[in-house]
Image (cartoon, rainbow, N blue to C red):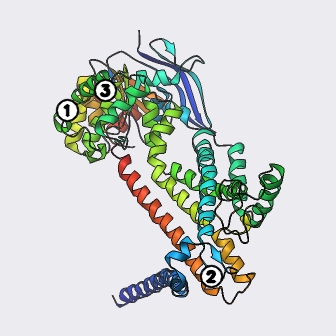
Amino acid sequence: MSQQSSLAKKKRRNQNIAFGIFTFTSYAIVALLFVILAFIVIKGIGVISWEFITEMPKNGMTEGGIFPAIVGTLCLVLVSMVFAFPVGVLAAIYMNEYVKDGWIKKIIKQMTNNLAGVPSIVFGLFGMSLFVNKMGFGDSILAGGLTLGLLVLPIVIRTTEESLKAVDDTFRQASYGLGASKWETTSKIVFPIAFPNIITGLILSVGRVSGETAPILFTVAAYFLPKLPTSIFDQAMALPYHLYVISTSGTNIEASRAMAYGTALVLIIIVLISNLLANALRKYYGNKVKTN
Amino acid sequence: MHKIESKNVNFNYGEFQALHDISMSMKENTVTALIGPSGCGKSTYLRLLNRMNDLIDNTHMTGSILIDGVDIYERQTNVDDLRKNVGMVFQKPNPFPKTIYENVAYGLRVNGITDKNEIEERVVTSIEQVALWDEVKDKLKKSAFELSGGQQQRLCIARALAIQPSVLLMDEPTSALDPISTAKVEELIYELKNKYTIVIVTHNMQQAGRVSDNTAFFYMGKLIEYDKTKTIFTKPTIKQTEDYITGRFG
């Protein structure tokens, strides 16, 4: 009896230690995130004003606003998504629904994974030589957006593939069993079920695209351009690059320090809003799919 | 003429041979039960009848299966048309995440029926056919997920019937259902026999006894014995069959 209770004690102790570690790490991550956010909010909230988000930068970027950088980033997000979302989703559908298991599938998979591991500055160089020079888009939103699109392509493909995989096979079988073709099954049954989760891929990509600096360095980003782009062939400012510029190579780094935190805060807010929006979309479609 | 006729069917999953030289035939408007322990090949055989195994990579089949005298594994056979003629009901109720109405209408639409009145008529008829109409008539626009498991399975049967197949394959259709729902589905199978040729895989001996005309006992990928259900259950000729039916193994 006493032996058993000492075993029970030992078990309980081990369990407590394990749970303690899990709990600690989870909370530590949340706390860390909170500290970073709080730091940026506290440092940046002071400069946030209507003028800051709607006006051009002035006086060597130590005053005025960041409006063109916000617009530039939004344009880049839009262009990259218009490119990466359909291409990535279609590629994932092909890989998950059409290709049979075998070496072709393995190669495509491996290549997609490799693509995800390529450093973003390399994407920048590639984008410069292909889109800017070879295809003649010049430094432009189009060139930068496409470069960013390439960068997030693996994310879109992977999350879409996971979402498709998560669709229970019995739905496919039921559809085929009724005489539906592969395309009908994919487009009318599998895709609608997977769609809410595919949106998650979109969220992640938007966050990534709005925050990347290296790929836009040589493809689109302007150091200082106090006007809005009028077409996708224009250069543009972008929030992450603007942040980099005013923190490292502005005319007066000390004077623009507050602006830098403000910029960072705006960037985070944009990502946050896109996440919330995507979550709402996901919920909406998740409910809709059950009753359409 | 036999409705379904298979000759010397062998089937492989990669290296593993799941079926050995299966030859059996089924008459029109009969219910045939496939029984045997797990992994004996009965579901694999069932899925050959509507070419569902085509969906699995690395499989290989030899021999021939004829439905209405036509070899369904011939090159010129259209698989979609075959599956329209050979309906299937699965082990777990698997209605689509759509409305009750759309679950049944989907099969009609993918088979090229666009006339709204015709779709509606056939949806109603099929739901009535599975005795589900009174339970769902007021919530056709609600999600099929709101139905109970038994209701969902009957909806899946309605879905299969809507496209007017002549053969109905059922892969352990009641294994996920409670006794009352099971009884309802069995009753339904009994009624459907007049119009359809039914092949049902089941683990439930009593069920095989209740619903089927003929029973085939599979073991280790081989067809051990195939005869009238009454004969199989009262005086099987092969000892393995008797052992399995009396619960001595399996």
Which residue: 65% across, 78% down? Answer: A58
Residue at the extreme front of the image, as rendered:
A59
Quadrant of image for the C terminus of chain B: top left
Q: Is residue A96 left or right of residue A127?
A: left
The answer to the question of whether label 3 and label 1 lie on touching residues, with beta carbons closer than 8 A, is no
Q: Is residue A249 left or right of residue A232?
A: right
Number of marks: 3
Foreground label between 3 and 1: 1
The x and y percentages for residue B165 are: 37, 21
- Mark 3–mark 1 Cα distance, whole angstroms, equals 41 Å
- Mark 2–mark 1 Cα distance, whole angstroms, equals 71 Å
Chain holding disc 3: B
Q: Is residue A174 left or right of residue B58?
A: left
Q: Which mark is residue A21?
A: none
Q: Nearer the viewer, residue A183 or B64?
A: A183
Q: Nearer the viewer, residue A189 or B14?
A: A189
Residue located beneath label 2 in the image: A63
Disc 3 with disc 1 on a shared chain: yes
What is the three-letter code of the residue carrying label 2?
Answer: Glu
What is the three-letter code of the residue carrying label 3?
Answer: Lys
The x and y percentages for residue B50 are: 47, 26
Residue located beneath label 3 in the image: B235
- Vertical position of residue B168 compared to residue A211: above or below: above
Q: Which mark is residue B133?
A: 1
Q: Nearer the viewer, residue B115 or B203?
A: B115
Disc 2 with disc 1 on a shared chain: no
What is the three-letter code of the residue carrying label 1?
Answer: Trp
Per the image, label 2 sits on a secondary structure element best described as: strand
The x and y percentages for residue A69 are: 63, 69
Per the image, label 1 sits on a secondary structure element best described as: helix
